[in-house]
Amino acid sequence: MSEICPICSLPKEICRCQELAKTEQRIKVSVERRKWGREVTLIEGINSREISLSELVTKLKMRCACGGSAKEGVIVLQGDHRHNIKGILGDLGFPSDNIDIA
């Protein structure tokens, strides 16, 4: 028995909600200095209702070889990863035109 998507009510095998959600996102990537001058990369604008932030954060942490977390719709990665994030998110299915690097 297959699971049903709660958004479109189609079986998960043929559901395309996540692919459509990725094309509609407007993602903002920035770097912030925290306590003791440490830099963190902030990724904002990903809709957590349609895309699993915990799975996305796990993939980003593995690809960037860093620590991080997702809280309140914002992904926080330890270190400055602005130069890699656009390519990594592109590989994960997000259109690079919708990713703004600050």
Image: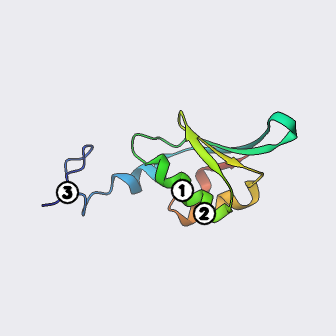
Task: Name the residue that disc number 1 marks.
Answer: 58
How far, Cα to Cα, is label 2 from label 3? 30 Å
Quarter of the image where the C terminus is located: top right
Q: Relative to the observer, which residue lies in front, 89 or 97? A: 89
Label 2 vs 3, first from the N-terminus: 3
Where's residue 73, x and y in %? 53, 37
How far, Cα to Cα, is label 3 from label 1? 25 Å
Label 1: few (<14), some (14–19) or many (≥20) C-alpha neighbours in 10 Å: some
Task: Name the residue that disc number 2 marks.
Answer: 62
Where's residue 69, x and y in %? 59, 45
Q: Which amino acid, by three-letter code, is at mark 2?
A: Met
Task: Name the residue that disc number 3 marks.
Answer: 11
How far, Cα to Cα, is label 1 from label 2? 6 Å
The residue at 67%/57% (across/down) is: 85
The residue at 38%/53% (across/down) is: 18
Q: Element type at marker 3?
A: loop
